[in-house]
Amino acid sequence: MQTHIKICGLTRPQDVETALRCGANMLGFIVEAESSRKLDVETAARISRPASGCAKIVAVTVNADAELLRNICSEMRPNFLQMHGDESPKWLSEVKAFTGLPIIKAVAVRDRNDLERAKTFENCADYILLDAKAPKGDVQRGGHGLAFDWALLKGFSTKVPLILAGGLNLDNIRAAKATGLNFFDVSSGVEAAPGIKDHEKIQAFMKAAHE
């Protein structure tokens, strides 16, 4: 199966350019959510525009209301909405209905129960993204450079494709591929600092992921 890569937490035009040049399939932009990589809608629209037609643009949100989501769709015109908060299956279905966009639902994982909870989104999400749970008390939902125990994935599957996130980097991408998944989301693992991508790390990660 062909490996797919989403590079998330992009904040600079030059990083978008490098991600595209290295063949990223999806580019993620964190919009109006608690994060060191946070962008406002206007900035996200401007920075993501060069990716249109080259890679799928993902607007990453956390518990966004209908007004914000409509604004994102109007200004940014993403290909996907990533819901990284406490959104319910019912709300995801409503969002799909009024935006017309496919949904990536992020699920925070620490144990097998968390994985089973991911199945509740099978009928309303187009992808389920499995991320490590944030440290206790941290309001930022992702991008901590932490991985959950990938051994939990043995024998686990859902009706919709899975994306593996959390702590991915050049040193562990081969082990990540050994889980049997073929879609990976990387952010801090290709950074020099939060929101500042390292172009050499992007290139090396992409090369290793496709080997």
Image (cartoon, helix red, strand yellow):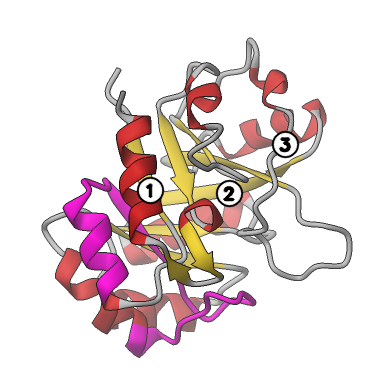
Residue 198 in the image, given as x and y percentages of width and height: 41, 62
Question: In this orientation, does residue 198 appear?
Answer: yes
Q: Which mark is residue 62?
A: none
Identify the residue position indicated by label 2 in the image: 106
- In this picture, residue 1 sits left or right of residue 114: left
Identify the residue position indicated by label 1 in the image: 6
The residue stretch that appears in magenta: 14-43
Q: Secondary structure at mark 1?
A: strand
- In this picture, residue 152 sits left or right of residue 20: right
User: Mark 1 is on which residue type?
Assistant: Lys
Q: Secondary structure at mark 2?
A: strand
Total number of numbered discs in the rendering:
3
Instruction: Return the residue found at the far left.
Output: 53
Within 10 angstroms of label 2, few (less than 14), some, or many (20 or more) residues? many
- In depth, the one of 180 and 69 nearer the eye is 180
Q: Counting residues from the N terminus, which is met first, the one under dot 3 or under dot 1?
A: 1
